[in-house]
Image (cartoon, rainbow, N blue to C red):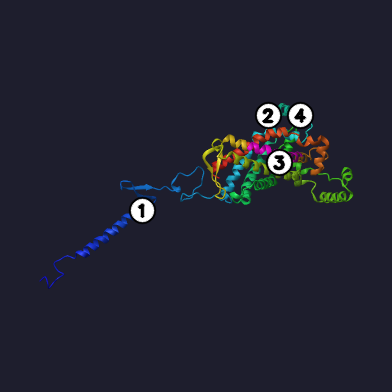
Amino acid sequence: MSTAFPDHGRPDVSSSVQSSRQLTSQSGSNMDEVTQASTPRSSVTNDKHGTAVVTGQTSATDTEPAPHVNKNPNGQAKQLNKRSLDYVARSGLAGGLAGCAAKTVVAPLDRVKILFQASNPQFAKYSGSWFGLAAAMRDINHYEGLRGLYKGHSATLLRIFPYAAIKFLAYEQIRAIVIPSRDKETPFRRLISGSMAGITSVFFTYPLELVRVRLAFETKRTSRTSLLDACRQIYNERVTPSPAKSAPSSKIASAPVSASAETASAIVNKTVPTSGLANFYRGFSPTLLGMLPYAGVSFLTHDTVGDWLRSPLIARYTTIPNSQSSRDSKHGSRTQLTAIAELFSGAVAGLVSQTSSYPLEVIRRRMQVGGAVGDGRRLRIFETARTVWLESGFRGFWVGLTIGYIKVVPMAATAFFVYERLKWTLGI
């Protein structure tokens, strides 16, 4: 029986063992997959006793995000797009609010400085001394009240918000183009970025600056000129063309040069409107020339002093721990300065920039009030500079500089401080 049917009556042991091994292998692989899925960032190591120990490997995406650093849905650091509408809106808002805060702080000093620069007859006796500032402010407060110290401030705020917004926004955009990476960041490139940003902002907001200066220059005690009245007055002013010949210039210059200058002057007088919107751009040329050193040196000095204050030697005293601002990945993040360090950086920036551009600022103020004093003739840059020289000499280009120093320190410090803090708050 057994020899006739050799396969019956005994189990197939080899096939059973093979099936068991296959099931065990499949279940083991399934368990490994489940284990890997449950601990994707873990590894198994053996301690000194041979016991398996699971150690977690935490990646950068598992840590808490740094303050104000944008993250994408995967938890990775998100690169800032400075061309995006969101970045443009946030940086413009931060710049505009920073400018308004700075101008509000120094509005009384700004009023007195304009009166000194434009040689207002009632306040000329106060210029040139430290005590003149206090005396001028006391007289304004006595005759016009506290509101007199803020005369023209409404026009200032209307101008300064778009001006500061465009300036800081343009600086961020131009800087991203001129300085594409960290190794390209040089003082010259910083200077160019700041200068171009200043020119861009002043081009769009200069008419409001002119109206503000006119309102601040006015010292009438019987009536107040409204913003609309000032605009109407400037628009309707008739400009007297410059004479074809000038005796002083003919004596100084040679005949061919004088003839060329007279021809160019005649062409300009025929082409430049004598009234209308052109009146809102009185003094625009020296403004552009003055903005080149002012804005450029301001941003250059602020960034340079900020780099010094962030040096490892003193960083623990001047920076806020774990406060990296989220710049684009090309430039890396910057640690926020403390309040005192940021105010100091902005104050130094304002001080240096004010000194470098003050003579051109004096010429600009005189040209801006040209329609309110004198014969109404539109003076050019060199004519205005010659008038200042003949009236007061070399000191005439620096009149009111002491007030400028007193004013520019809190103004620039406030502007840069508010701007940097708002950028940090808004995550840009």
Residue 125, image x, y percentages: 78, 29
Q: Is residue 414 above or below residue 1?
A: above
- 4 or 3: tag closer to the N-terminus: 4
What residue did someone put label 1 on?
36
Of marks 4 and 3, the one in the foreground: 4
Magenta stretch prevailing secondary structure: helix
What residue did someone put label 4 on?
126
Residue furthest to the bottom: 4
Q: Magenta region: which residues?
A: 346-362
For badge 4, the amino acid type reads Tyr
Residue 57, image x, y percentages: 40, 48
Label 1 sits on a secondary structure element that is: helix
- 1 or 4: tag closer to the N-terminus: 1
Residue at 45 percent across and 48 percent down: it is 60
Q: Is residue 189 visible in this depiction of the protein? A: yes
What residue did someone put label 2 on?
146
- 2 or 4: tag closer to the N-terminus: 4
Q: Which of the 4 image quarters holds residue 309?
A: top right
Going by the image, does 324 lie left or right of 135?
left
Residue 362, image x, y percentages: 75, 38
For badge 3, the amino acid type reads Glu
Label 4 sits on a secondary structure element that is: helix
Quadrant where the N terminus is found in the figure: bottom left
- 2 or 3: tag closer to the N-terminus: 2
Going by the image, does 154 lie left or right of 263?
left
Of marks 2 and 4, the one in the foreground: 4
| Inter-mark Cα distance, 1 to 2 | 74 Å
| Closer to us: 252 or 85 | 252
| Inter-mark Cα distance, 1 to 3 | 67 Å
